[in-house]
Image: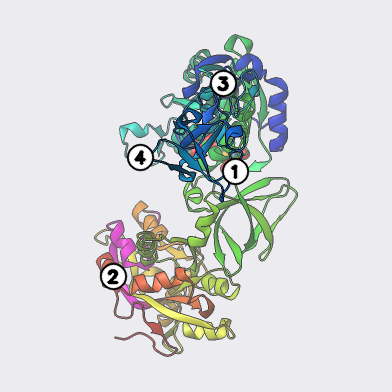
Amino acid sequence: MKRNIYLETVPISEALSTVQARLDRTALVKTEMVPTHEALGRVTARPVYADLSSPTYHSAAMDGIAVLAEDTFSAREDAPLSLSPDKFTPVNTGNALPDGVNAVIMIENVLMQDDGTARIEAPAFPWQHVRRIGEDIVATELLIPSNHELSAYDIGALLSAGIWELSVYEKLKAVIIPTGDEVLDFRDRPTPKPGQVVESNTQVFSALASKWGIEVIRHEPVPDRPEALTEALKNALLSDAHIVVMGAGSSAGAKDYTRSVLSELGEVLVHGIKAMPGKPSLLGIASEEFGSKLMVGAPGYPVSAVICFEELLAPLAAWMSRKVLPARPQVDVTMTRSMPSKLGMEEFLRVSIGRVGDSYVATPLSRGAGMITTMTKAQGICRIPANSEGINQGQTLPASLLVPRESLEQTLVVVGSHDNTVDLLADALMGRDTPIHLASTHVGSMGGLMAVKNGACHMAGTHLFDPDTNDYNAPFISKYLPDADVVLINLAIRHQGLIVAASNPKNIQGVTDLVRDDVQFINRQRGAGTRILLDWHLSQNDIVPSQVKGYDKEEFTHMAVAVNVLSGAADCGLGIMAAAKALNLGFVPLARERYDLLIPRQHLSDPRVQAVLETIRTDAFKERIQSLGGYETDLTGQEMQPGMGLPE
Ligand SMILES: Nc1nc2c(c(=O)[nH]1)N[C@H]1C(S)=C(S)[C@@H](COP(=O)(O)OP(=O)(O)OC[C@H]3O[C@@H](n4cnc5c(N)ncnc54)[C@H](O)[C@@H]3O)O[C@H]1N2
Ligand code: MOO
């Protein structure tokens, strides 16, 4: 089997219209009769006419007495009328009206006399408080047109009209076949070795598809062997499914067989869309022998797979089943950072969104297609058009929301340096009666200061040490945000040190060991407080960066540094003790430092910020911080003043 060569990439809209022009949805999606009470979400294949009227009889709409209106015309407040028992019938709501009457008088307006007569002070008009035959539904009239997706209310109307079953389009069925030698079945609860991944895309698809009214059958993972892949695809096409999805193997790798397997059993119409993630997506139609079904090749990377499911498969499935795909709510967001984008490619940028002041601000998350957490952390997605070279800081553009719009009001936007205590805070805030969602973006301490300066967040986590004054954060604020009215609140004092392998096999004892030939270092990104701390310790020891092997290799979080040490990619990196502890690594203490929250004063009265201050001042929260190890909470929750430095 030949290796894949990419087809031309086409815009998403063209990919969809190409398939729509070729796929015979009427032949593929049959109709069937289903009981009305089980028809929610199904689409009518034929118009439905009422069999029964509703009500089927003249019905009392109120509790009271049924009368002939004409008998009551003389009643006045100053000249009450007494109706003899043969002129009225007591009725309850929903009763059929007796013959010969045409109105109901509410019981509140009737005085029943001891002699059996009913006294009224106002006349009834004809058909007052009566629901006449066919008021709601008239037998034979059109109740629901064809190609209509049935709602809960429709079920009620259909049953009231005597429709016990109806003709609808089949519910779409899809088989998804995960592929790849490295893909482990999650049902085996595997522990992946290097080169292996836990299969998850099929479950993302199943969960999404259940919202779209598609039944999903998952095939077990198939290894990268062309015959096995073809066999699996063939069986799936011969089942009663309408759609078959093959996962992964869609790009140009030596084991990427999806395209050739699809071509063997049908025709590939699209291979490659002008969008990222999701670029190598495939769409095709099986040959007649295999039911002319829709075939989809979804890229293996989790976010690419999501884009393929949501942007290609969902609209096609909606079209096949004649449903309207609901659009996500949109808000206009202001970007807090510039983000270049590839010309000619539409980009689905995951963004963290919150309301800061009067506007919604959005901070781009990492764009890696392999990172499913960019979807879990994002509140929205901005589509950067293909004809754009990117977005600029301060630019306003629409974002489609992944969360209810209301929840943005309960989102606290934190930008800056990452610390595990911020994760603790995030969890504690969600435990409040009115939960608050902490959306954090890790851009380092300096990035946090800039975000505050640009009005892009409610608060920033920062731990910048200034050797000249022996103080934390305040000197940087006076330098970079001289005019800003801000408050510094301490979150914790934390211990930074060298994260080394368990039991420290290379016996690394301090920064002077970083110049050793056998020591590979992993650094933090420029602007990170930890990097500034490292540079200071290096300069104190007359070491220049070029002497440190790995100084140029950067990671964005403490945990990422620790992971490098765990995997053996590096021998050590500077980070917090909690990160070392979390992965059972060794830790060589180097320094204590202040980790503060920088808050614009105008946000102090914001209920979300208030909730943070309340939370971090509780003993329970301080105890949680201490149990992480490597933290002190003596200053936690207190306002920091310039020159305070760090108490011994
Ligand atoms: N030389 C090139 N390489 C790649 C290109 C390219 O144009 N030229 N495109 C890249 C893009 S863009 C994408 S997207 C990926 C798509 O790759 P494949 O669809 O071929 O998928 P794999 O390589 O088999 O797997 C990618 C990744 O995803 C993991 N995976 C696979 N299945 C699952 C699953 N069911 N659940 C969770 N994770 C899964 C797999 O282990 C890999 O890590 O190709 C780029 N390469
Ligand atoms: O298009 Mo790929 O989907 O960027 O990762």
- Amino acid beneath label 2: Gly
Disc 4 secondary structure class = loop
Mark 1 or mark 3: which comes first in sequence? 3
Q: Considering the image in quadrants, where does the N terminus appear?
A: top right
Mark 1 close to ligand 2, CB under 8 Å: yes
| Residue 192 falls within the magenta-colored stretch | no
> What is the number of the mark on residue 261?
3
Q: Mark 4 — residue?
A: 192
Disc 1 secondary structure class = loop
Q: Mark 1 — residue?
A: 277
Q: Quick check: 617 left or right of 283? A: left
Residue 18, x across and y down, in percent: 72, 27
- The CA distance from mark 4 to mark 2 is 30 Å
Mark 4 close to ligand 1, CB under 8 Å: no
User: Given the current orientation, which residue lies at the most extreme top position?
Assistant: 289
Disc 3 secondary structure class = helix
Residues at circles 3 and 2 in contact by the CB criterion of under 8 Å: no
Residue 630, x across and y down, in percent: 28, 70
Mark 2 or mark 1: which comes first in sequence? 1
Tell which of 552 and 428 is nearer to you.
428
Mark 4 or mark 2: which comes first in sequence? 4
- The CA distance from mark 3 to mark 4 is 27 Å
Tell which of 513 and 143 is nearer to you.
143
In terms of image quadrants, where is residue 54? top right
Above or below: residue 343 compared with residue 525? above
- The CA distance from mark 3 to mark 2 is 55 Å
Magenta highlight range:
569-593
- Amino acid beneath label 4: Pro
